[in-house]
Image: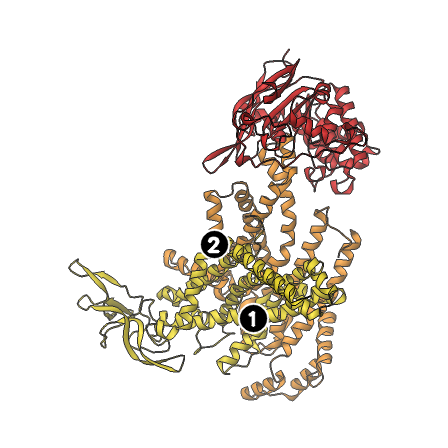
Chain colours: A yellow, B red, C orange
Amino acid sequence: MTDMSQHESDALKSYAEASGFRLGWAKFRRHKLAVVSLYIVGFLYFLAIFAEFMSPYDHSEINRRHVLTPPQAIHFVDTDGSLALPYVRALKGERDPVTRRLSYVEDDTTKYPLRFFAPSEPYEMWGVIPLETRFIGIAKPDRKATLFLFGTDSLGRDVLSRIINGARVSLSIGLVGVAFSFVIGIVLGGMSGYYGGWIDTAVQRTIDFLQSLPTIPLWMGLAAAVPPGQDPLVTYLMITVILSIIGWTGIARVVRGRFLALREEDFVLAARFSGASEMRIILRHMVPSFASHIIASLSLSIPEMILAETALSFLGLGLQSPAVSWGVLLKDAQSLQAISQSPWLLIPGLAVVVTVLAFNFLGDGLRDASDPYGKT
Amino acid sequence: MNPLISVKDLSIGFHQRHLVLPAVENISFDVAAGETLGIVGESGSGKSLSARAILGLVPAGGEITSGQITYQPASGDPIEISSLPKNGRDIRSLRGSKIAMVFQEPMASLSPVHTIGNQISTTLRQHTDLSKRAALTRAIELLDQVGMASPAEIAEQYAHQISGGMRQRAMIAMALSCNPRLLICDEPTTALDATTEAQIVDLLAKLQADLNMGMIFISHNIGLVSEIADRVMVMYLGQEVETGPAETVLKTSGHPYTRALLAALPAFTEAGAELATLQGTVPDPTSRPTGCSFHPRCPEFAGEHCKTVRPVLHAIADRHCAKCHLHD
Amino acid sequence: MTAYIIRRILWFIPTLLAVSIVSFAIIQLPPGDYLTVLEAQMGAEGDYSPEVVERLRERFGFDQPFIVQYGKWMWAMLAHGDLGYSFEWRMPVSSLIGQYMVLTVAVTVTTLVATWIIAIPIGIYSAVRPYSAFDYIATILGFIGKATPNFLLALILMWLAFSYWGVDVSGLFSPEYANAPWSWAKVGDLITHMWLPIIVLGTSGAASLIRQMRANVLDELQKPYVEAARAQGLPEWRVVLRYPVRVALNPFLSTIGTTLPELFSGAVTTAIVLNLPMAGPMLLRALISQDMYLAGSYIFLLSVFTLIGTLISDILLTLVDPRIQFDEA
């Protein structure tokens, strides 16, 4: 092949890829729910990345004078009925004389306007950048002023700030877990589909076997063996590895299926006849042609990982406090007594449901788009 | 005596967004008992749709926009099929009993999860009060009648276990189960090889004569239709372009489209002469050509008025009509 | 076909072996052996007896390699139905978990049946009337059901029941029956308590089954044999039920293989939240206190029941669908 024709064929190839991508994108755009979900997922990851700045408080800041306060309302109307800039009121604790239970009421006489880029106690973003501003907060805070939009937990910590910070673990565990699963899945699934024969049989049987096991008891058994009291990062990684032990099977199935279909395709045969090495054939020719399918199936695996971590941490077998994840937060809502008195402790569950829904719709949209020539 | 089935000015349209796309426009034909009408056309010509309309089976999204389909029962008043409620009791009592249909792909048209005998007896039991056992006995008789070698065994088998020709015979047996007066065959041999095709066509012709049924035989193959039909209707883009006795249409075709179809057949071309092929493809129904729909492909294009003026159906001989400006 | 079924049953044996190895590996995972723990515990409680420790050491082969310990565990299980010893409860595992496993299987199987009874008609109706209001509602509920983890749904329902009717819906029995011997009245009490676990467990499975049934039936409705059935003169409901639904039910049977592991998984978390006398709470407690024979036995038995369910569904599928290729296996 001369340099000239090589150059031409590359140009043609990039043109074909671009138009394939454009077709897929056009198709994805038609899937309205998937587009909305893409924005939601993007927003959630943005929150997770800039968690310290986006949350109104430090997630571990204990506030003994405001234990289990209900969510505070943002007011737009003044006591005299006129419109006002958004503000909150101070909370007064009142103890029931009989049950001795503390309840909180708003103090009508106080008014704390809110603002963006509000001043705060000094803190460090990502542990390095010192800041004294938070995205939202009370314009002129004093000792009585509080902004607990989702209420507080039994130690007086702000639930909203904990959810935003918990998103870091909950959202990243999906990505990291899927990355692990992806590596195992693509290697084993690829071998299975590419070589066939006994390797295929062995991998397929293993997948069948793993998929027929009830995952949660198995995960629980494995997670229970993770020694407690370790560095949270180590626990985090071990949990992800445990989740990937079963997580890779779905991805391996997809990869194998695509390999089987592609093995006989003309362009793969052509590459082989022209003497390209096996590795080159796989990486240069086969992987790009099913990348879109893989991306779609990965985006459908992420929510499963998120749900699994949430369940394990909820049961106390995953991450442990002081680490925060949505599962760890939901652990506070485990008893009927806790949720009947402080139902806002269930809000982290809402975050889980929204995230999982968004990922599912996104995955559906990507799956449709990954097949640009398919019908509707 | 009225004909068995009479179709008058039938138009069928499909709703798409705010407009109605015409799929069949103003076609008319009659079929009498003991007579075979052949309908010929390329795919998209509306031939299958017209036939399905007789059974009230216009697919979702489509509807009869004008015209009547009238069925004349053996005794009593004629029934106007086109005004019966869709899938209602009245039309269902005709389907499969008085008017039956043989479909294109027997493999796909037979249930994959019921035995052949079971499917035939279902039709029987729907329209008669035969017992389960009696229906099965009758099903085996029918399988015998359509030339199955061991009907009792076939009745026990599933569609995927028997050959293509046998499947189509089973479909025919199912259609014949309630002694229909009109049999509609929608491309019954398309999925079969040439030898089996000939056997099935012979079988249909024989059964039709024996049972004195009216028959509508739909095909894209004008040669095949001419073998079995008494009369032929040629359709193009939802319109009938030529109608007449089979013999006349073959020998003195009145429409360039018919002539083009015939010229593409080896049997109708002189030995050694080159086979003609029809230029172009059937246009999309959304972009129907102006004037005569066939003008962009017409080998005998006659001038500007073909592009602008819609031709009407001209009688060119006894019972022989063609829709072409050549006869103006 | 018989050959296929026999082969499928034979294949069950190596699968069981694999499950037993995985379960035993989990038993072995935590560092240290139980005797050290037990000795410390007995010592602390002042009832240390060297004979007991020695007997247990001999019985489980604690000082021997993995394979020998595994062999002893398997042999005891096969020969005597002995699943090992719970160090926390100081009781043989087999006498401890019987009733809990029975209730787990009972609730799971009931849920499976309930899921089908609900999901199949809804799925069919959604397919026959696609894009209707009903279809959209079913779709939305289905997506939410799939995205809500079991334990969260259990918490929410428990909270709603408590705040609107003031009842505590946890548990599987009323207090007066909890420790009573089995009687018809106790069975009746169980049935009245079972609806909540069934809703919690069944929702996510039902949601995906509805989607699947809808997609399958929609697919089948496009097939020519449906029109052929209409041309036979069958009424529309018979056309739908006799052909597309019948065909769509087959892949449905094979979903038992994926539904059952999910149900057993869900049953564990649900039982923990709702405090049901099922496998979950005791398994969790055993895992936390590292009472490994008890935990491993639970994991083993839950897996075995799942595998049996899958085996049954595979066999049913071959009996029901004439198109299955038996040479595949």
Q: Amino acid at mark 2?
A: Arg
Q: Position of residue B205 (x, y in %)?
A: 76, 24
Up the image or down, A59 lies above or below B173; here it is below
The disc numbered 2 marks a residue on which chain? Answer: A
The answer to which of B133 and B18 lies nearer the viewer is B18
Q: Which residue is mark 2?
A: A29
Q: Is residue B51 left or right of residue A102?
A: right
Q: Position of residue C202 (x, y in %)?
A: 53, 55
Labels 2 & 1 near each other (Cβ < 8 A): no
Up the image or down, C71 lies above or below B241; here it is below
Residue A39's image quarter? Answer: bottom left
Q: Position of residue A370 (x, y in %)?
A: 56, 57
Q: How many marks?
A: 2
In which quadrant of the rendered image does the N terminus of chain B lie?
top right
Residue drawn at 74 percent across, 71 percent down: C79
Which is more foreground, mark 2 or mark 1? Answer: 2
Q: Amino acid at mark 1?
A: Ala
* Circle 1 SS class: helix
Q: Position of residue C153 (x, y in %)?
A: 46, 60
Q: Is residue B273 left or right of residue A262?
A: right
Residue A373 bears which disc, if any?
none
The disc numbered 1 marks a residue on which chain? Answer: A
Q: Which residue is mark 1?
A: A179
Q: Is residue C167 left or right of residue C45?
A: left
Residue C1 shows in the view: yes
Residue drawn at 52 percent across, 59 percent down: A363
* Circle 2 SS class: helix
Q: CA distance from mark 2 to mark 1?
A: 26 Å
Furthest residue in direction right, as rendered: B149
